[in-house]
Image (cartoon, coloured by chain):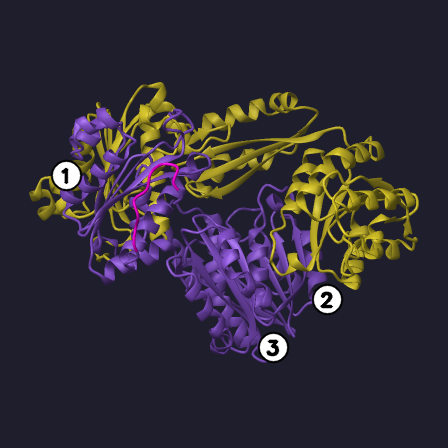
Chain colours: A purple, B yellow
Amino acid sequence: MVRAELISVGTELLLGQILNTNAQFLAQELASLGIDVYFKTTVGDNRERLRQALQNATDRADLIILTGGLGPTEDDLTKETLAEYLQLPLVIVPEELAKLQKLFQRNNLHWTENNAKQAAFIPGSVIFNNDCGTAPGMAILNRGKGYLVFPGPPSELKQMFSRYAVPWLKECFPAEIKESLYSTVLKFSGITESGLENILADLIHAQKEITLALYVKPGEIQLRVTGKAASQSEFEKKADALLTEIRKRTVGYLFAEAGETLTEVVTQLLQQKQLTISTAESCTGGMLAARLTSIPGSSTYFSGAIVAYNNMVKAQLLGVPTELLTKFGAVSKEVGTAMAEGIRQLTGSAIGIGITGIAGPGGGTAEKPVGLVYISLATPEYTICQAHHFNGDREGIRCRTVSKAQYLLWRYLKNYANEENEVGQQT
Amino acid sequence: MVRAELISVGTELLLGQILNTNAQFLAQELASLGIDVYFKTTVGDNRERLRQALQNATDRADLIILTGGLGPTEDDLTKETLAEYLQLPLVIVPEELAKLQKLFQRNNLHWTENNAKQAAFIPGSVIFNNDCGTAPGMAILNRGKGYLVFPGPPSELKQMFSRYAVPWLKECFPAEIKESLYSTVLKFSGITESGLENILADLIHAQKEITLALYVKPGEIQLRVTGKAASQSEFEKKADALLTEIRKRTVGYLFAEAGETLTEVVTQLLQQKQLTISTAESCTGGMLAARLTSIPGSSTYFSGAIVAYNNMVKAQLLGVPTELLTKFGAVSKEVGTAMAEGIRQLTGSAIGIGITGIAGPGGGTAEKPVGLVYISLATPEYTICQAHHFNGDREGIRCRTVSKAQYLLWRYLKNYANEENEVGQQT
């Protein structure tokens, strides 16, 4: 059994200026590999105290994982202290230095000499490339103990851990990493947590070997199905009957089983069906367009969008009839529908989505309160417009609107019915 | 000077099932009291390892703060282990037991005997009432060291710390807790961390009473200026000369001193100057429009946007001349400029921003690689277009593009010069 310890380095962590999400991420990943973490320690950017932490961890654990303190500045001293502690040198690796300098050049960044230390490593260590930042990571085996060093920025650490550290761990500790925790996450939209809990209550309570846990995430509900197994395929066999039952009960809500986002799912469906889409947005200000274009290759299905923030743009650019704007107001079923149909015609897309609403905090009235949003979907087969009343602050209302629009789109692409509705009706 | 250590107890923390927000809260509170935290440790619900952590902390610190493990179940063993470590008994306090039993009765909870241990304390300790839960906390002075024990649920801990622990700390360490830490955060754009470090190197090294620390955040660099003082206004007086010097050296980069985002700063400037803006976006797909409309009241300055993802939309909706598209390609200075000028004319805005680039991962060529982005700013005074080459994945390139566009806009609104450039040139 491999025992690991985490050492997070950074005065900003000790001062509570940032939350230590890296420690949580690593703990989860190590747990799923079957590696036990017994201690987590946080120290500041201080050589002596980091040395103490290294001493304690080396006394107790087989695997010591350090995060943070790999940057170019003077208070970045993780590698320096580790090398000193192991009584090994730290040497600039020419290829890594060249890589760094090239990166700086390509990004038009000014090279200063202090950056060179990011290319210094303990001889004999494995260097982990930093695919989304500058400072590389490092792994070294020393007197039977493994030391791993990662950069502090969470996005850099996560990618480096999954891509390079996991294979290294499996290679260095093959006998230990045998039974791991496996899990599958199912994602749902268009249903609340308690609604889903009701549908699945007996399954949630009955399970022992395999556990079910619900989580509320922005724009979706997640169900985590977890069990111990020797391999992913063995876990899938164990969970098969249960997953089949869950799928049967959640048709029309379950949109992903492999970690995909709703955006990924709808854009894959658009690509498969060779359909194009465009959006006309008011209160979401381009968020739906930004979401739909966040996927590589989006030019194959996304034509364009108009953010029609004022009535002049709605009328002149989008072709919304002025009489609709004056008669029903910009936030109305009629205008939402005209926006969806307008952008569809303008761009020649198969599908048009129109969004108009009041994101607040100002602009609400008794009749049209903050949170009222009309979402219209215009397709070759039908055009519908739904009224929704979302809760939350400006950002929350905008995000919920985008999620709901994607949910309507998903239902259309999956050939599930989409119903019109009136304000105040359950959606 | 009081040195503190935090020990978080709980296997769920080691497994990463929950994020350790308590440690962040306590670190912030202690820092503001002027108490230095040198180590934070997390241990599982394990008597021997908790004893080790207590030993280490007692060797190094004056104040040891434990959180979690105060509940009624068998794996709750924080008080038990502390008592054992201090070689002191743990005794049921009748009044506390009666209080607990009454609480159970009032909330219609079933009393089980294991709950009684929540009423057990080390004789001579101060008991902290739990105003929003069951398990009380405890504080004890032993051989010159202070031990504080708090329940794990964050809401219970926070209230208990502020209401009962702070007064206790001020009573027990009156000479030490006079001054608190205060800080100000300055935000910079358009400059790298190392560039800023170079400009400020002598100030960073010279300061003792007031410390300067740089942090890289998405789209900006932050400089935290921190010092001990009796009050916020005294801190401001102490830091005044230093802040004035920093401001002088960072003109054109320093955009916020009161926590505002770059989006907030530019939209405030637009409102102050009563200027309107619109965007024409290709690779960012509406992200800049979404960002500019994220602020309440954005309809006063934001007219609208066109997301021109394909050439047809660029030509027909945005009026980009077809000959520019065929001669220079969609990703070119000429098309970027035409997009900015096109949207400005179409919407009648004072300012137009045009963005065209290759966000990848596909679509790059040797001449026009992934990450190449043209950002054009069209204003009543001038139109410029900058070429940039951003690093990162699709999301990173899109985010950096939006930040850079906002930076150009900020420079214009502050009357700083904006220079044109060619690909590969320093920007």
Q: Residue at x 71, y 37 (%)?
A: B159
User: What is the chain letter for disc 3?
Assistant: A
Q: Which SS class for mark 2?
A: helix
Q: Amino acid at mark 3?
A: Glu
Image coordinates of residue B37 in percent, x first then y, are 71, 44
Alpha-carbon span between mark 3 and mark 1: 61 Å
The answer to whether residue B90 is left or right of residue B416 is right
| Residue ID for mark 2 | A59
Which is the main secondary structure of the residues drawn in magenta?
Answer: loop
Q: Which SS class for mark 1?
A: loop
| Residue ID for mark 1 | B317
Q: Residues within 10 Å of mark 3 (few under 14, many from 20)?
A: some
Image coordinates of residue A127 in percent, x first then y, are 48, 65
Q: Residue at x 24, y 34 (%)?
A: A335
User: What is the chain letter for disc 2?
Assistant: A
Image coordinates of residue A424 in percent, x first then y, are 39, 37
Alpha-carbon span between mark 1 and mark 2: 68 Å
| Residue ID for mark 3 | A176
Where, quadrant-wise, is the N terminus of chain B in this rendering? Answer: top right
Image coordinates of residue A205 in percent, x first then y, are 59, 64
Viewer-proximal residue among B7 and B16:
B16
B423 in relation to B278, above or below: below
Question: Splitting the image into 4 quarters, where does residue A40 fall?
Answer: bottom right
User: What is the chain letter for disc 1?
Assistant: B
Camera-near label (3 vs 2) is 3
Question: Splitting the image into 4 quarters, where does residue A290 fall?
Answer: top left
Q: State which tag comes first along the sequence, 3 or 2.
A: 2
Camera-near label (1 vs 2) is 1
Residue stretch in magenta:
A417-425
Q: Residues within 10 Å of mark 2 (few under 14, many from 20)?
A: few
Residue A22: give its label.
none
